[in-house]
Image (tube, rainbow, N blue to C red):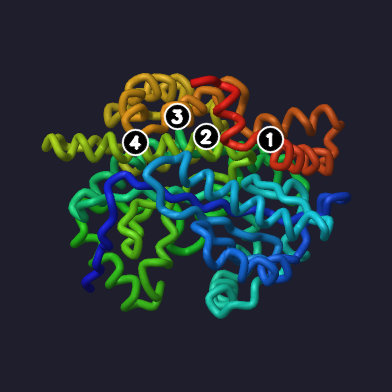
Amino acid sequence: MTVPFATSRRSTVGVEWEIMLADGTTGDLVPRAPEVLASLEEKSALERHTITGELLTNTIEVTSGVGDTVAEVVDDIADAIADVRQVTNPLGIELLCAGSHPFAQWYDQQVTDKTRYHKLIERTQWWGRNMMIWGIHVHVGVEDVNKVLPILGALTAYLPHLQALSASSPFWAGERTGYASNRSLVFQQLPTAGLPWPLTDWVQFEAYLDDMVRTGVMADATEVRWDIRPAPRWGTIEVRACDGMSTLPELAAVASLVQVLVEHFSRQLDEDRELRTLQPWFARENKWRSARYGTDARIIVDSDGTQRPVADHLRETLEQLAPIAEELHCAREFAGVGRILDDGASATRQLLVADAADGDLREVVQHLIREFRAGPTLRDHLASLGS
C-alpha cells in the first residue's frame, strides 16, 4: 500500500483541544454539542479555527489553523473558545477540560450520530462505551517523509514527560483511581491505540497499514490511534499521548515542548546523527509509571536502564533545548513547562481540591470550570511575565 505524506513546512504547528460541556450548577455533563455546533457552523466557516463534534455529544473539539508559532495557534484556540462561549453562556453551559470527568458515568452519555462512531462502539463494546476521555493533539510539520519514523521513535522516549505534564484524570466515574492519568490506560484498550510499533522507515509504516486494512482492522491511516502517529494527510507528526489540559497557558507549554523536541530531532537527522530510542519494554514501563505517578514518576531515560525523576529530566531538557525554543519564538511558552512542575499538574490540583472538600467531586468539577473560565488567556499570561 502506498501512503503519500503531504507536503508541510518544517516545524509548523497545530493544536486540537477536546472540551467538555457541563451544567453550570451541577457540574454534570450535558449532551448539547449538536445544539451548540448548529449555532456555530456558519460563523466559523471563514475562521482559521474549526469547532466540531466528537464521539460523545457532551464534547466539542476546537482546532487551530496551521501556525509558525505556538502563540499563533493558541490565539486561534482562544478565538474559538470565545465563539463557543457566545453560544454556551446564554444556555447555562460551562466549559472545562481534563483527561476525565470526576464523576460522570458512561451509561448516562450519548454517542454522536455518525456512522464511524457507531461502528467503533459496535466493535469495541464496553471499552468503547467507556471512552469518556478528553485530550489534546499537537501536530508538528515534517518536511521529509524519511524523517517521520525516526523522529517518532525518538519522541517515544519523551511520552512519559508529556503524559506527566498533562496528567489530569485522577478520578474515574466517582472513584479516586490512584493514577495521575487514568485516561492513558483506558484509551490504550482500543484496537490500534497505545504505544506506536517500533517501525524505522515509511515503507514499514505502509506495510503495517496494508496488513491492518487487508485484515479489516481499520479502514485507513486515520484509524491509527497511537500515542504518537504520523498524520499523512497533513504532513505532520501528531502527539496524542496527553490528557486534556485544564488551562490555555498549560496547553501552550506542552505544545511548545512538542514543537521544540521535533525540531531538535530533525536537526540531529540533518547532521546524520542516529536518533536514540528506548527498548519497547522500557517505553511500556515508562508509560505506566507516568500514568501512575505523574510528575512524581521515576522513569527510564536511556537504553542502559538509567532511572531519573521525570521532573529533573524535564528541567534538564528545558535548559538544553532553550536555544531552539528561542529560535522558534516560543521561549516564554516553553518556560511554562517549568511552571507546571513548580505549581503541580492538573491531577495534583484536583486531588488537593477533593481533599479540602472531604472528597466532594462536584467541588472538583467546579474547580475545573473556574480554571477554564477564569484562568488567563495566553496573551494575558505572557504579558504578566514581561518580555
Label 1 or label 4, whichever comes before in sequence order: 4
Residue 54 seen from this side: no
Q: Which element type, helix, strand or loop, lies under badge 3?
A: helix
Q: Give the Cα distance between marks 1 and 2.
A: 21 Å
- Separation of disc 3 and disc 2 at Cα? 16 Å
Q: CA distance from mark 2 to mark 4?
A: 16 Å
Marks 1 and 2 in Cβ contact (< 8 Å): no
Quadrant including the N terminus:
bottom left
What residue does disc 1 label? 375
According to the picture, the residue beneath numbered tag 2 turns out to be 164
The residue mark sitting in front, 3 or 2, is 3
- Residue 329: percent from the left, percent from the top? 38, 32
Number of marks drawn: 4
Mark earlier in primary sequence (2, 4): 2
Closer mark to the observer between disc 1 and disc 4: 1
The disc placed on residue 334 is 3
Q: Separation of disc 3 and disc 4 at Cα?
A: 11 Å
User: Is residue 317 placed above or below 124 in the rendered structure?
Assistant: above
Query: What kind of residue is marked 2?
Result: Ala
**Residue 182 at what x, y percent from top left?**
61, 45
> Is residue 59 placed above or below 299 in the rendered structure?
below
Q: Amino acid at mark 3?
A: Phe
* Mark 4 lies on residue: 261
Nearest to viewer (mark 3 / mark 4)? 3
Residue drawn at x 30%, y 58% as measured from the top left: 235
Q: Dot 4: what SS?
A: helix
